[in-house]
Image: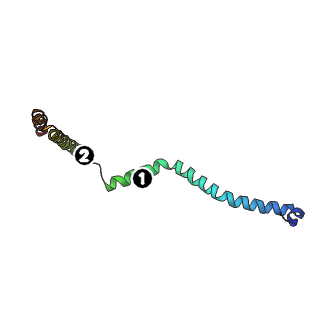
Amino acid sequence: MSVLSIAFPFEAAMAFAGVAAGAARPLIGISIFATLFLVFKPLLKGLLHAALLLISPRKSLEERRSAQRVRSAWMLHRMAREYDAAQPNLAAELRQLASRG
């Protein structure tokens, strides 16, 4: 504090108010941005979902079912390879199940 701030306390208060306003401005901006983000969050999520669907569209039900059948067959073949040496009968049954599709 200087001698002038004692002599003219009003100007010192105005200078402090200017510093406080300068410090509060970013906080107000961040709070407005956060509020807008919360208000428009469903819209933003919908736009993001639409953009992702444009990049990689959802597969049809038949395509998803056929992919699941292929994954199941590969899983049974892997299990058959694991049991091949220890239990050949079980491995043969697993291969037969995998071949049914």
Residue 41 vertical position relative to residue 14 in the rendered view, above or below: above
Q: Can you say which quadrant of the picture contains the C terminus? A: top left
Q: Position of residue 43 (x, y in %)?
A: 46, 50
Q: Position of residue 75 (x, y in %)?
A: 20, 41
Q: Secondary structure at mark 2?
A: loop
Q: Quadrant of residue 96?
A: top left
Between the residue at mark 1 and the residue at mark 2, the CA separation in whole angstroms equals 22 Å
At 73% across and 61% down in the image, what residue appears?
19
Q: Which residue is mark 2?
A: 60
Direction from residue 33 to residue 56 in the image, left or right: left
Q: Amino acid at mark 1?
A: Leu
Q: Position of residue 37 (x, y in %)?
A: 53, 51
Direction from residue 65 to residue 23 in the image, left or right: right
Q: Earlier in the sequence, mark 1 or mark 2?
A: 1
Count up the numbered dots. 2
- Closest to the observer: 77 or 5? 77
Q: Secondary structure at mark 1?
A: helix
In the image, farthest residue toward the right: 7
Q: Quadrant of residue 28?
A: bottom right
